[in-house]
Amino acid sequence: MNRVLTYSLEFRGEAVDDGRGLGLLLRATAPPCTHETRVENEGLVSRFFFGDCENEAILESRLALHEDGRFAAITTVDFGHGHRLWGQTEDDGRLLPSADVHLRQGTATIHVIGGAGQFRGATGQITSNFVLSDTGDLTDNQLGMLFLRELELAAL
């Protein structure tokens, strides 16, 4: 039996050249938060409420860039206390110019390929929608939908 776990986090950090000219290394953190989206008469309203907790999730990703804006990636999301996810993006990630000349917008689907702690045996996908500034500042909004094996949950 599986249990579905969804999460939404906003990671902030930086992207740097991988030193070989082949891609980027991303590192960012996300504090615990609540993401609220409301449909109101004036339109859609969305915001994050950030908690004052000491714990943060850590995102590390290595992007292999192609000239046409596509990329492949290997990603780790560390939620602390031994709870970690590993995922990969085949060559279907995109990093392209945006309406703001100082920002590139990226999108990717990260396919979960492994995990530890709470996520041992997990499967699922994480969608990543991010912006990268020309100075290397990164903001990555992730929505994960994970399937956790009930047997793994009982062992925790």
Image: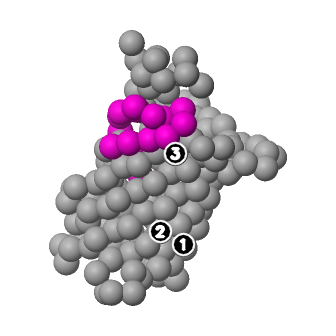
Kindly indicate whether the residue at mark 2 contacts the one at mark 1 (C-beta within 8 angstroms): yes
Task: Name the residue at 47% across, 79% down.
Answer: 16
Q: Residues within 10 Å of mark 3 (few under 14, many from 20)?
A: some
Task: Name the residue at 44% across, 59% down.
Answer: 130
Pinpoint residue 99: horizontal percent, then vertical percent.
Answer: 39, 69
Q: Is residue 139 above or below residue 149?
A: below
**Residue found farthest to the right:** 52
Q: Residues within 10 Å of mark 2 (few under 14, many from 20)?
A: many
Q: How many marks?
A: 3
Write down the region rendered in magenta: 113-129
Q: Between disc 3 and disc 1, whose residue precedes?
A: 1
Q: Nearer the viewer, residue 17 or 134?
A: 17
**Residue found farthest to the front:** 155
SS class of the residue under badge 3? Answer: strand
Q: Between disc 1 and disc 2, whose residue precedes?
A: 1
| Mark drawn on residue 26 | 2
Q: Is residue 124 above or below residue 66?
A: above
Task: Give amino acid for label 3.
Answer: Arg
Kindly report the secondary structure that dominates the magenta region of the rendered protein.
strand
Task: Name the residue at 22% across, 66% down.
Answer: 70
Is residue 86 something one can see in this rendering?
Answer: yes
Would you name the residue on which mark 3 appears?
Answer: 84
